[in-house]
């Protein structure tokens, strides 16, 4: 029996979260959604996913702070994090990568790009 790769999509925009979930579910991944930064932290800490697609902008705690907290916690630091944002400047990408994100993708993203980036971080993490 093969264990499904678990992905958590953390985005407060319902359409974007559903789109990412649909794309990744069609690829055979087990996908859950978190709609707030607090829900994201709770879900990752209680059952760490293999990959976290993390929106940079949340109304309360920003995605960069969520990433920083997860990467500084020994229980969650191995979770592969792909930052997702409409902000695609070099500065934004570098900031995300420097605080511990494994990749950075800009919205809107294409199906093939999202799947390729998830596969790439899974390869690098050895999952």
Image (cartoon, rainbow, N blue to C red):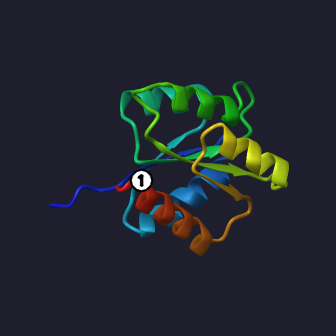
Judge by depth and name the residue closer to the eye, 122 or 106: 122
Q: Residue 12 in the image: x percent, y percent?
A: 66, 40
Q: Which residue is mark 1?
A: 125
Report whether residue 58 is seen: yes
Image quarter in which the C terminus is found: bottom left
Image quarter in which the N terminus is found: bottom left
Would residue 12 be found to the left or right of residue 33 on screen?
Answer: right
Find the residue positioned furthest to the bottom: 112
Q: Residue 16 in the image: x percent, y percent?
A: 65, 54
Judge by depth and name the residue closer to the eye, 13 or 83: 83
Q: Residue 71 in the image: x percent, y percent?
A: 53, 32
Would residue 3 be found to the left or right of residue 124 on screen?
Answer: left
Name the residue located 60 percent from the left edge and 44 percent from the top edge.
101
Q: Secondary structure at mark 1?
A: helix
Q: Residue 23 in the image: x percent, y percent?
A: 52, 66
Residue 63, by quadrant, is top right
Would residue 98 be found to the left or right of residue 124 on screen?
Answer: right
Q: Is 66 located above or below residue 98 in the figure?
A: above
Residue 100, by quadrant, is top right
Would residue 53 be found to the left or right of residue 15 on screen?
Answer: left
């Amino acid at each position: 029996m093969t264990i499904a790769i678990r992905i958590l999509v953390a985005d407060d925009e319902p359409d974007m979260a559903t789109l990412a979930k649909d794309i990744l579910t069609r690829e055979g991944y087990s996908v859950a959604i978190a709609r707030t930064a607090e829900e994201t932290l709770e879900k990752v800490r209680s059952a760490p996913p293999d990959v976290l697609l993390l929106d940079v902008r949340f109304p309360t705690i920003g995605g960069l702070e969520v990433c920083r907290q997860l990467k500084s916690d020994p229980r969650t630091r191995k979770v592969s994090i792909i930052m997702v944002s409409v902000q695609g400047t070099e500065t934004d990408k570098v900031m995300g990568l420097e605080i511990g994100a494994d990749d950075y993708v800009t919205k809107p993203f294409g199906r093939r790009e999202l799947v390729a980036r998830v596969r790439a971080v899974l390869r690098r993490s050895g999952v």
